[in-house]
């Protein structure tokens, strides 16, 4: 029986080590997803700033070229609509990605919690096995 308890102890320790490794992997995945989300936010901000810069440049050009004002205004309106549609599309895509990442992070967090509970249960079983072994060795 002591040998069986030792085997159970070894199996439990192995399972605990495996669970701890899984927790570390899940935590790294969460960190990488958060980094990816931050990078997407940064890229979106840069694209927004670039779009604003293009729009301002276009507006200054219109002020200096008064003789072609009417044609350039039409072009500007079309460009603004395209840029606005692109920005809205990018914002929508970013929001979708953010939502997916948040869902994945929540799933990973619950998985980490589940693994932690499993680890605690295995630790409890290990303590019980140790207690039983200690009681038998005392007798």
Image: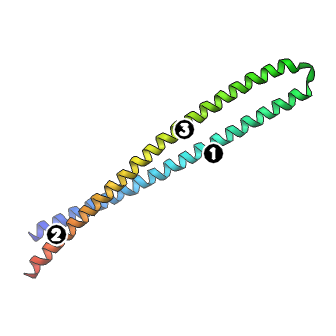
Name the mark on residue 25: none
Is residue 1 positioned above or below 26 on the image? below
Q: How is the image coloured?
A: rainbow
Q: Residue at x 43, y 55 (%)?
A: 27
Left or right of residue 80: residue 86: left
Q: Quadrant of the C terminus?
A: bottom left
Which mark lies nearer to you, 3 or 2? 3
Q: Earlier in the sequence, mark 3 or mark 2?
A: 3
- Give the residue at mark 2: 129
- Give the residue at mark 1: 42
Q: Position of residue 60 (x, y in %)?
A: 86, 32
Indicate the secondary structure of the residue bearing disc 1: helix
Left or right of residue 124: residue 29: right
Q: Earlier in the sequence, mark 3 or mark 1?
A: 1
Which residue sits furthest bottom?
138
Q: Position of residue 41 (x, y in %)?
A: 60, 44
Q: Residue at x 12, y 66 (%)?
A: 4
Indicate the secondary structure of the residue bearing disc 3: helix
Q: Earlier in the sequence, mark 1 or mark 2?
A: 1
Q: Pointers 3 and 2 in contact (CB under 8 A)?
A: no
Which residue sits furthest top?
71
Q: Residue at x 65, y 27 (%)?
A: 85
- Give the residue at mark 3: 95
Kindly report the distance in space between the C-alpha atoms of the residues bearing marks 3 and 2: 50 Å
Q: Pointers 1 and 2 in contact (CB under 8 A)?
A: no
Q: Residue at x 63, y 42 (%)?
A: 43
């Amino acid at each position: 029986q002591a040998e069986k308890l030792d085997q159970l102890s070894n199996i439990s320790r192995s399972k605990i080590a495996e669970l701890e490794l899984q927790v570390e992997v899940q935590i790294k995945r969460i960190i990488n997803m958060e980094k990816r989300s931050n990078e997407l936010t940064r890229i979106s901000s840069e694209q927004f700033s670039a779009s604003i810069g293009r729009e301002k440049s276009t507006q200054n050009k219109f002020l200096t070229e008064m003789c072609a004002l009417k044609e350039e205004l039409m072009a500007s309106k079309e460009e603004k609509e395209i840029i606005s549609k692109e920005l809205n599309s990018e914002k929508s895509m970013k929001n979708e990605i953010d939502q997916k990442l948040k869902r994945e992070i929540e799933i990973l967090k619950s998985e980490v919690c589940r693994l932690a509970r499993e680890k605690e249960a295995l630790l409890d079983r290990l303590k019980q096995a140790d207690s039983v072994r200690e009681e038998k060795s005392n007798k």
